[in-house]
Image (cartoon, rainbow, N blue to C red):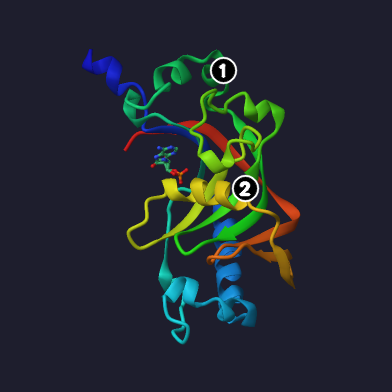
C-alpha cells in the first residue's frame, strides 16, 4: 500500500549534534583555507582549475552541505536494493533514536567533494548494510570503509560521490606526506586527491535516525 511504501525513508544514518556540526564546519573551512595557500597544493592546482596558471578559491569552488551526517543505508523510500530488509533489521529498530559517538579520523578533498572519514566500531558496524554497494577497485577493503560525512560538493556533483571518492583513495597505495599540518600529516594521492590524517581523531556525537525529504 502507498502508506507502507512511504514509511521507508530516503536514507538512514548518524546525524551529528549541532554543537559538533559547527565545530566540524570550522575545522573543514580552516583546512580548505590552509590548503589553498600551500605551495604543494598550488603545484597541482590544474587538477581543480583545468589550467596550470589559474588560481582556485576552494571556498568558492565548493558548496557546503547542510545537516552533516554519516549515511548507513540509502533506501530511496524503499526502492533501493535491500531497503526493506534494512528497515526491518532488529538492530536498526533497536538503535533508532540512540546517540552514538562517531570517530572522525581524516579529512579529504578531491576536485569533486570534501569529506570526513569515519571509522566505525564493532557496535556501529551492526548498523552497516549487509550488502554494501561495491566498486571493483574497493572490493578488498574492509566493511564500512565507505563511512564518511559529506562536508561539501563542487558545482553539479551529487553527495553520493563523496563515499566513492573515499573508497578510491583508500584503494590506492598510501600517498606521500607533502606537509605536516597543525592537525596531522597531509598526503597527496594524485589527480587532485588530498587526505589529512587527524593526529587526534574527532569524537562526534550523532543520533542514529533517518531522513525523509
Ligand atoms: O553524503 P551522502 O552519504 O551521499 O548522503 C547522501 C544521502 O544518501 C542522501 O542523498 C547518500 N546517497 C545517495 N545515493 C546513494 C547511493 N546510491 N548509495 C549510497 N549512498 C547514497 C548521499
- On the image, the x and y values in percent for residue 80 come to 36, 27
Q: Residues within 10 Å of mark 2 (few under 14, many from 20)?
A: some
Based on the displayed image, in which of its 4 quarters is residue 154 positioned? bottom left
For this orientation, the residue located farthest to the front is 136
Camera-nearest label, 1 or 2: 2
Q: In the image, what residue occupies the spot 66% across and 54% down? A: 106
Q: Nearer the viewer, residue 168 or 122?
A: 168
Where ligand 1 lies, by image quadrant?
Answer: top left
Q: Quadrant of the N terminus?
A: top left
Q: In this orientation, does residue 17 appear?
A: no
Q: Does 104 appear above or below 33?
A: above
Report whether 85 appears left or right of 70: left
Q: In this orientation, does residue 137 appear?
A: yes
Q: Nearer the viewer, residue 92 or 155?
A: 155
Q: CA distance from mark 1 to mark 2?
A: 33 Å
Q: In the image, what residue occupies the spot 52% across and 52% down? A: 165
- On the image, the x and y values in percent for residue 8 come to 36, 23
**Label 2 secondary element:** helix
- On the image, the x and y values in percent for residue 93 come to 51, 18
Q: Which residue is mark 1?
A: 94
For this orientation, the residue located farthest to the left is 2
Q: Which residue is mark 2?
A: 171
Q: Residues within 10 Å of mark 1 (few under 14, many from 20)?
A: few
Amino acid at each position: 500500500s502507498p502508506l507502507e511504501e512511504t514509511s521507508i525513508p530516503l536514507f538512514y544514518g548518524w546525524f551529528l549534534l549541532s554543537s559538533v556540526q559547527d565545530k566540524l564546519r570550522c575545522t573543514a573551512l580552516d583546512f580548505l583555507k590552509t590548503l589553498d595557500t600551500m605551495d604543494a597544493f598550488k603545484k597541482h592546482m590544474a587538477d581543480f582549475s583545468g589550467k596550470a596558471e589559474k588560481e582556485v578559491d576552494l571556498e568558492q569552488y565548493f558548496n557546503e552541505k547542510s545537516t552533516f551526517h554519516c549515511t548507513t543505508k540509502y533506501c530511496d523510500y524503499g526502492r533501493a536494493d535491500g531497503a526493506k530488509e534494512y528497515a526491518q533489521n532488529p538492530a536498526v529498530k533497536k538503535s533508532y533514536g540512540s546517540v552514538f559517538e562517531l570517530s572522525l579520523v581524516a579529512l579529504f578533498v578531491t576536485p569533486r567533494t570534501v569529506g570526513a572519514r569515519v571509522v566505525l566500531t564493532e557496535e556501529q558496524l551492526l548498523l552497516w548494510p549487509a550488502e554494501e554497494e561495491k566498486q571493483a577497485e574497493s572490493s578488498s577493503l574492509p566493511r564500512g570503509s565507505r563511512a564518511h560525512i559529506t562536508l561539501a560538493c563542487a558545482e553539479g556533483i551529487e553527495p553520493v560521490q563523496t563515499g566513492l571518492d573515499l573508497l578510491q583513495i583508500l584503494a590506492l597505495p598510501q600517498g606521500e606526506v607533502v606537509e605536516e599540518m597543525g592537525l596531522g600529516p597531509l598526503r597527496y594521492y594524485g589527480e587532485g586527491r588530498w587526505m589529512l590524517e587527524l593526529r587526534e581523531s574527532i569524537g562526534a556525537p550523532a543520533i542514529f535516525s533517518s531522513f525523509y525529504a
